[in-house]
Image: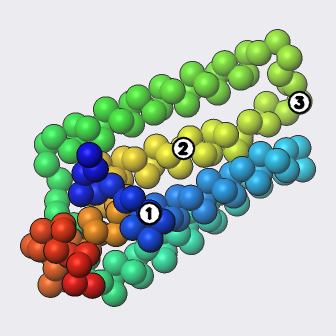
């Protein structure tokens, strides 16, 4: 029922996936904050959170001797298709919000946290297709140090 890269509990989630949760919780808080934050402030907050998660992930990868498996044509094509589809979705959603009759012209980016959350999902998904981020800790550990060639089921059991 579950693939080897599917986490079944919070402890099975990778650091990357937990970071995406933190990012999205911050986007929800910004949605609640509403007009208290300018769009540029929303972008700055989202960028700072994303940069912090990326920096912590990089340090973690260095400590665990992570190795990227490389790029295959299928994964490259999947990433490009995902970028196109998510770009179209976000553009269509943002365009529809800008054209709504009740939408305030003086605050065209009031839906900024929603778009930034969608962008976060898109970035994580593309990096996941490229095997740079992981949904489960097992999949991450498979690409690390001495465990690089250990099957997913065994990588988690011994560490």
Task: Assess disc 1: are there few (<14), some (14-19) or many (≥20) residues with their C-alpha within 10 Å of its C-alpha.
Answer: few
Question: In this rendering, is residue 60 above or below 35?
Answer: below
Q: Is residue 13 left or right of residue 152?
A: right
What x and y, as percent, mark residue 139?
26, 65
Numbered tag placed on residue 9 in the rendering: 1
What x and y, as percent, mark residue 120?
53, 49
Q: Residue furthest top?
A: 101
Q: Earlier in the sequence, mark 2 or mark 1?
A: 1
Residue at 40% x, 47% y: name it: 125
Q: Is residue 91 left or right of residue 77?
A: right
Residue at 56% x, 41% y: name it: 118
In space, the residues marked 2 and 1 are separated at their CA atoms by 25 Å
Can you see residue 79? yes
Looking at the picture, tell me which residue is in the foreground, 14 or 49: 14
Residue at 34% x, 87% y: name it: 63
- Tell me whether circle 1 and circle 3 mark residues in contact (CB < 8 Å): no
Is disc 3 placed on a helix, strand or loop? loop
In space, the residues marked 2 and 3 are separated at their CA atoms by 23 Å
The residue pinned by badge 2 equals 119
The residue pinned by badge 3 equals 106
Q: Is residue 106 left or right of residue 153?
A: right
Q: Is residue 108 left or right of residue 153?
A: right
Is disc 2 placed on a helix, strand or loop? helix
Q: Nearer the viewer, mark 2 or mark 1?
A: 1
Is disc 1 placed on a helix, strand or loop? loop
């Amino acid at each position: 029922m579950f693939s080897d890269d599917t986490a079944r509990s919070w402890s099975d989630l990778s650091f990357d996936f937990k970071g995406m949760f933190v990012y999205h919780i911050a986007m929800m808080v910004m949605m609640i904050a509403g007009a208290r934050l300018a769009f540029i402030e929303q972008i700055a907050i989202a960028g700072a959170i994303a940069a912090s998660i990326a920096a912590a992930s990089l340090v973690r990868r260095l400590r665990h001797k992570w190795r990227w498996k490389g790029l295959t044509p299928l994964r490259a094509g999947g990433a490009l298709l995902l970028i196109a589809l998510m770009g179209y979705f976000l553009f269509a959603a943002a365009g529809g919000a800008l054209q709504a009759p009740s939408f305030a012209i003086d605050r065209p980016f009031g839906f900024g946290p929603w778009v930034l959350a969608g962008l976060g999902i898109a970035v994580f998904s593309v990096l996941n297709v490229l095997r740079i981020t992981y949904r489960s800790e097992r999949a991450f550990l498979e690409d690390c140090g001495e465990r690089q060639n250990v099957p997913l089921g065994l990588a988690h059991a011994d560490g």
